[in-house]
Image: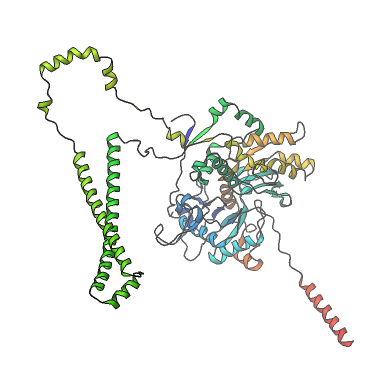
Amino acid sequence: MAANVFPFRDARAAPDPVLEAGPVAHGPLPIPLVLDNGSFQARAGWACPGPDPGPEPRLQFRAVCARGRGGARGGAGPQVGNALGSLEPLRWMLRSPFDRNVPVNLELQELLLDYSFQHLGVSSQGCVDHPIVLTEAVCNPLYSRQMMSELLFECYGIPKVAYGIDSLFSFYHNKPKNSVSHGLIVSSGYQCTHILPILEGRLDAKNCKRINLGGSQAAGYLQRLLQLKYPGHLAAITISRMEEILHEHSYIAEDYGEELQKWQCPDYYENNVHKMQLPFSSKLLGSTLTAEEKQERRQQQLRRLQELNARRREEKLQLDQERLDRLLYVQELLEDGQMDQFHKALIELNMDSPEELQSYIQKLSAAVEQAKQKILQAEVNLEVDVVDSKPETPDLEQLEPSLEDVESMNDFEPLFSEEAPEVEKPVTTVQPVFNLAAYHQLFVGTERIRAPEIIFQPSLIGEEQAGIAETLQYVLDRYPKEVQERLVQNIFLTGGNVMYPGMKARMEKELLEMRPFQSSFQVQLASNPVLDAWYGARDWALDHMDDDEAWITRKDYEEKGGEYFKEHCASNIYVPIRLPKQASRTSESQAAGKGLGASEQA
């Protein structure tokens, strides 16, 4: 393969098998289920105790659904996640339960949970008899949590649930055990980017900030850039392929302006441009046909046109003959003296006199005779063409030259030695060489850094928001200097949108510019930015399996409402709904009663 040419993988998801619950899941205590409910991808698995809890979640699938139609894909039921296969043919049908990163459509969320429980092999009948650890958005609205709790307790009948933030679970997985630490989490996902300060091991929710940019906006920006650059391949530049370019070919520039200057150099461009090969067919119309095949194809087209014209002539002749017979029948009525029927027939034919009838008969008779002559002539010409197309076999004995003829030709050969080669030289036509593979290549140059750059410069796509560096500075400025010093000693990067090469170096450069001279800081990248949230939730579930202060039971749900949850080291801050006090209502009613009594006395 040529240098820097990369084919699109166009990976197609394989349907998930229905797994059987492992033997460890049938112990005396039900094993917790861990669900990382992400807006891009959902991950589900068991929190199995023991030295080897398992390498990764057993189930990973895109958090999208598509309602099938009758006859499509073998049924009319909804398709979920990996059962969809390739997403592009169904892109217009895809539905997500999320608005940004908050689940709002509980009907679709129920489909995702059904898919997870079914493929994990939950064996309990009529309910899900396992504790569940579920991730949620930062500062999740109470209404969203209330609907989720109602779904889990009322529909699935779970015994208890614990809510936590995915980035805090990732932080929990990567920090040393039993250590209470400060830190500043930078979490960038598919829809949003968050800056989360951690003080004494707990989230400081009042100073959290969100940027409404993530991998989804980067993929859309990259798609617009390449569609403007290659308008001939609009349909081939899909969101799935843009996500593949982002995941495997993009990187974060340490200095964006300086990197753009490098790309202006032709040698640098040639060495670093990635040529993405689109699928194409190497067979062009007429490219592999010989001269004889082309001649045969022309003759076939000619015969087809002749047959079509002959069929049209016959149809027109038939119509004219039918009308002529009708006119002759009317003329016979006149000759037989049936005047009443003759006048009625003239009115139906929209004619005024017998002379007009006779004129039409003469014209139609001439047209019919002319059409018959054309049809006969066309049949004769077709037969002549067929006869002429057969090659004649000459008499080889008559063409065999005698010895005297050969000697006489040898005598005249020097006279024609210069002209004969020119006459016999075949005429070769030079055809332009067209590289079909190169035409179907997308040259991804500066787009490799322009698309991921939007989280640092949202103005590139017209967003009036601050980037990560400005938001980080704004959050730090809300704390005293000594707290700032503790926070910057543990800046933690997590989320699928921080996996670009160069992300850590870029964050260190931005911090070097904003922090005081000779001050220290430390940037840490999650060991697995995508799966660490699930690993952290699993670790938390195993560490707090018997801790009733962290789980919401069905009794808590019934007594305190669906929006209630218990705080822990990886959770949001609980802010209860403040309703007007009943005493104030009674005092208002008493005051209204006194006013009414005074008016009656008056």
The residue closer to the viewer here, 594 or 174, is 594
Q: Is residue 12 above or below residue 347?
A: above
Left or right: where does residue 313 sit relative to residue 14?
Answer: left
Q: Name the quadrant containing residue 23.
A: bottom left
Residue 26's x, y, as percent? Answer: 47, 57
Residue 466's x, y, as percent? Answer: 70, 44
Residue 37's x, y, as percent? Answer: 56, 53
Left or right: where does residue 51 sit relative to residue 454?
Answer: left
The residue closer to the viewer here, 573 or 219, is 219
Left or right: where does residue 14 sit relative to residue 101?
Answer: left
Do we see residue 236 in this rendering? Answer: yes
Q: For the view shown, which residue lies furthest in the bottom direction? A: 601
Count of numbered marks: 0
Q: Is residue 244 above or below residue 91?
A: above
Q: Name the quadrant containing residue 422.
A: top left
The residue closer to the viewer here, 49 or 90, is 90
User: Which image quarter is the C terminus in?
Assistant: bottom right
